[in-house]
Image (cartoon, rainbow, N blue to C red):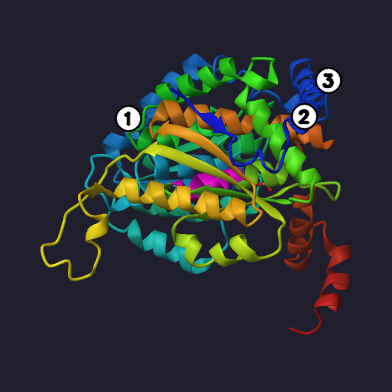
Amino acid sequence: MAIKLNDTYVKQFIAEDELAGMAPQIKAAQEMLTNRSGLGNDFLGWIDLPVNYDREEFARIEKAAEKIRNDSDVLIVIGIGGSYLGARAAIELLKSPFYNNLKKDTPDIYFVGNNINPTYLNEILSLCEGKDVSVNIISKSGTTTEPALAFRVFREFLINKYGAEEAKKRIYATTDKARGTLKELSDAEGYETFVIPDDVGGRFSVLTAVGLLPIAVSGACIRSLMEGAAAAREAYAEPDLEKNDCYKYVAYRNALYRKGKAIEILVSYDPAFAMMAEWFKQLYGESEGKDKKGLYPSSAIFSTDLHSMGQFIQDGARVMFETVVDIKEPKKDFFIKADPTNFDGLNFLSEKNMSEVNRKAMQGTILAHTEGGVPNLVLEMPKIDEFELGYLIYFFEKACGLSGYVLGVNPFNQPGVESYKKNMFALLNKPGYEKEKAALEAKLGAE
Ligand SMILES: O=P(O)(O)OC[C@H]1O[C@H](O)[C@H](O)[C@@H](O)[C@@H]1O
């Protein structure tokens, strides 16, 4: 069993011949990926990663994870964007959003360096007091400000606690194999390092050491994760659009986009999926949102958000479609007992598993939203485990690469991200940015 696309609720919006009409474009996009002839073709390492990864490094990741599990109460994972989202998403989905609060024999895992908020940093520092701590600093470029700043703080924390020599043994650096400040520092200090391959961009890097080390520390099986991705890689090599759910997803979302559905809402009925949606949003947002084009990726957790955004989705501007990730089997079900007095009038829900109630909520919502003019694609995921997650990750990555080519953009760059950085550096007097500073300050006026 694996991920399946159910297109029942999109058919009233996209006719069969419209879908078939997309086939040549998908085929062309697929050829661009296979022949490595499209834009950004030096960033296609993710395609074969599930079968073509460094086995020696993989074994070192497992060993490092074991050491961290044995000598640490807390693992601090420092990174932002693609160097953050995948690991956190996988741990929350596979383990729990409450992972840190659960009784367990694996370390607590905190993610820092994904913002510049001082309160957040202070709180996590205080959670480390009196604990044995290891640090995994992750940055492909090795120069991103947010993680670099957090690393400065946690490196000092480790040195103060353990002394310079022991601190070095508790720092694991995941970065470029040759370039960047982090690589230079790691070599000088002798940190254990892991490599983000040159041809794998940040947002496609969850199945490299970037995601694998923190995920392995949480106790999840990274071998099954890779096996799931490898199975998806094989399944989605199928050239026939009709038989390839990944191609179908690309075809539908692009057909919908061309009909004015410029927003895709990734929906789940499991709150543990919330960070997966954040991972999805970076993957698609940075890949497609450029040249003044692209679907805007957003997300919702239902039924929670049916009580907030539900109104808009049902009845507001008709600019969106939904991709519902339907997880067929919850990790733990809950049986609702009957109450002899039926004091709350809820006995109509009793003698049922809660998953059944959640499923009816999903079915009811899909019908209501499609009735309201919102196309729904349903991605059926049999259950939550490492294999299925690896499969899902590959599904979204492949669909993303193809979709970018169908849209006519380079899915593997992110030039737009630099603008805020330039302004921030100029305003902070970073050497080299002197010229821009005065003009920016004039625009801001007196603060
Ligand atoms: O891994 P790093 O080089 O630190 O990059 C972290 C993130 O920040 C950048 O600004 C990019 O927009 C992201 O694609 C990237 O994932």
Label 1 residue SS: helix
Q: Quadrant location of the C terminus?
A: bottom right
Judge whether residue 281 can be spotted in this image: yes
Packing grade of label 3 (10 A; few <14, some 14-19, many >=20) is few
Read off the residue under disc 3. 37
Image location (x, y in percent) of residue 285: 69, 47
Assign ligand 1 to one image quadrant: top right
Label 2 residue SS: helix
Residue 425 in the magenta stretch? The answer is no
Relative horizontal placement of residue 318, taking residue 301 as reference (left or right): right
Whole-number angstrom distance, CA of label 1 to CA of label 2? 53 Å
Q: Earlier in the sequence, mark 2 or mark 3?
A: 2
Whole-number angstrom distance, CA of label 3 to CA of label 1? 41 Å
Q: Identify which residue is drawn at 22% across, 54% down.
A: 350
**Residue sticking out furthest to the left:** 340
Which is closer to the viewer, label 1 or label 2? 2
The residue closer to the viewer here, 98 or 187, is: 98
Read off the residue under disc 2. 17
Q: Earlier in the sequence, mark 3 or mark 1?
A: 3
Numbered range of the magenta stretch = 273-280
The residue closer to the viewer here, 176 or 50, is: 50
Type of amino acid under label 3: Ser
Whole-number angstrom distance, CA of label 2 to CA of label 3? 28 Å
Does the beta carbon of the residue at mark 2 sit less than 8 Å from ligand 1? no
Read off the residue under disc 1. 66
